[in-house]
Amino acid sequence: MRHHSRSWIKQRLRLLASLELFNIPLQAAIWFGMIGLPVSVANALGFALFALLLVEGAGYWFAKLRHLGARGGPLPGAGAFAVARGANVAVLTIGLLFLAWTVATDPGSGSVPGLLFGLFAVLEHVNYFHVQLMYDTVEDLRYLRSRGLRRAHLARDLAVHARSRQVEVRGGGGLQRQH
């Protein structure tokens, strides 16, 4: 595996965070401006779910950049990302159920794109919180070919955060959980 310099890693993290944020207005301009999808409730909701996951992704890359600068310690905002992981499941489920119902009752350009945006939001959630789906470097592709899918970076950071919160400390007359 190739090791990159600290400055290369910082540049990469800034780029990843910036691209996630840039994609929100870019995708809105493409789909609603250039292509002319109607801004219906379903399409707006699906796009909002997609944008939410991109904001969370950008937040993670910025937190990772800050963590790299701090040279150790916990990932900034790890608790918030842990909450988002659980909240996303509820929000995405409710959103997708509504979007599926909308498509079933009124299929067309006012609903189907919204469902597709919502499904893409689910893929973004999986990519950040569970299994890495984006492989865009030579090292990533090499890993994918030799070992298959890898656990998402944020999932690994959240596992470290969970372990650090469950450190048992001996004190008093027994074991206590430190939170």
Image: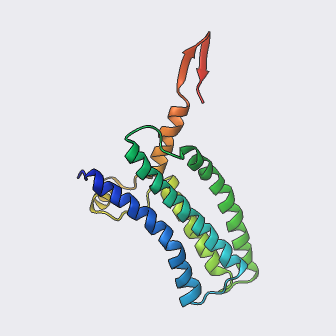
Residue 10 lies left or right of residue 40; in this view the side is: left
Residue 134 visible? The answer is no
Name which quarter of the figure residue 91 lies in: bottom right
Image x and y of residue 103, in percent: 70, 78
Residue 24 visible? The answer is yes
Considering depth in this image, is 41 or 120 the residue closer to the camera?
Answer: 41
Q: Residue at 59% of width from left, 73% of height from top? A: 117
Q: Residue at 54% of width from left, 76% of height from top? A: 25
Image x and y of residue 131, in percent: 46, 54
Q: Residue at 38% of width from left, 47% of height from top? A: 68
Residue 42 lies left or right of residue 151; in this view the side is: right
Q: Residue at 55% of width from left, 69% of height from top? A: 120
Residue 13 lies left or right of residue 82; in this view the side is: left
Considering depth in this image, is 128 or 148 the residue closer to the camera?
Answer: 128
Image x and y of residue 167, in percent: 52, 27
Q: How many marks?
A: 0
